[in-house]
Amino acid sequence: MDSAADEVEQAIAGELQLMDPRVRSSPELAGRLLDPGFVEVGGSGRRWTYATMLAELAGHPGGSADGPQYEPSEISGVRLAPGLVHLTFETVLGGRRSRHSSIWRRGRDGGWRMYYHQATRVPPGVDQ
């Protein structure tokens, strides 16, 4: 069985992969990292599902190698239970800062997939 630290590191690795333009632009690659029950509440307030995210992810900011790219920071995580990890972090994308929370779970195949994601835009001038 993986230790709590190993599980957190595996979830962080998956999170970083989802920020990679090559993964974001490929529904096949992104689909391997999102749980079929995936739900996101985006910074705009829009609710995304597995199907809607895979259909539109390539067109989102951060999905092109020649466009703005995610700059993650302060990534940390905690194992909630064996096979279940909660991550928090910040990103900057094209000058826009946001805070994120995601839940990753290990599937039956042993792979880690994002089950839930929440993003909140940080207004200019907000430090904490």
Image: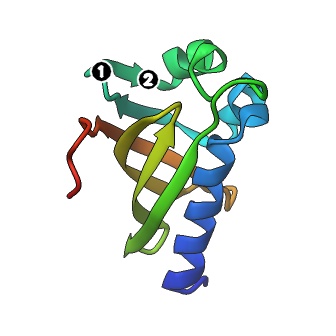
Give residue 126's position: percent from left, percent from top.
Answer: 20, 47
* Whole-percent x, y for residue 45 in the image: 25, 22
- Closer to the camera, 82 or 101? 101
Residue tagged by mark 1? 44
Percent x, y for residue 58? 66, 18
When the figure is inspected, residue 5 is found, relative to residue 79, above or below; the finding is below
Above or below, comparing residue 82 to residue 105 in the picture: below
Which residue: 60% across, 82% down?
A: 2
* 10 Å crowding of disc 1: few (<14), some (14-19), many (20+): few
For the residue labelled by badge 2, is the local secondary structure a helix, a strand or a loop? Answer: strand
What is the x, y in percent for residue 35? 54, 40
Q: How many marks?
A: 2
Q: CA distance from mark 1 to mark 2?
A: 15 Å
Q: Is residue 27 left or right of residue 48?
A: right
| Residue ID at (36%, 47%) | 100
Q: Is residue 95 above or below residue 64?
A: below
- Looking at the picture, which amino acid does disc 2 mark? Thr
Q: Quadrant of residue 25?
A: top right
Disc 2 residue crowd, few under 14, some 14–19, many 20+, Cα 10 Å = some
- Quarter placement of the N terminus: bottom right
User: Does residue 31 appear anywhere in the picture?
Assistant: yes
Q: Is residue 121 above or below residue 4?
A: above
Viewer-side residue, 110 vs 53: 53
The C terminus - image quarter = bottom left
The amino acid at mark 1 is Ser
Mark sitting on residue 49: 2
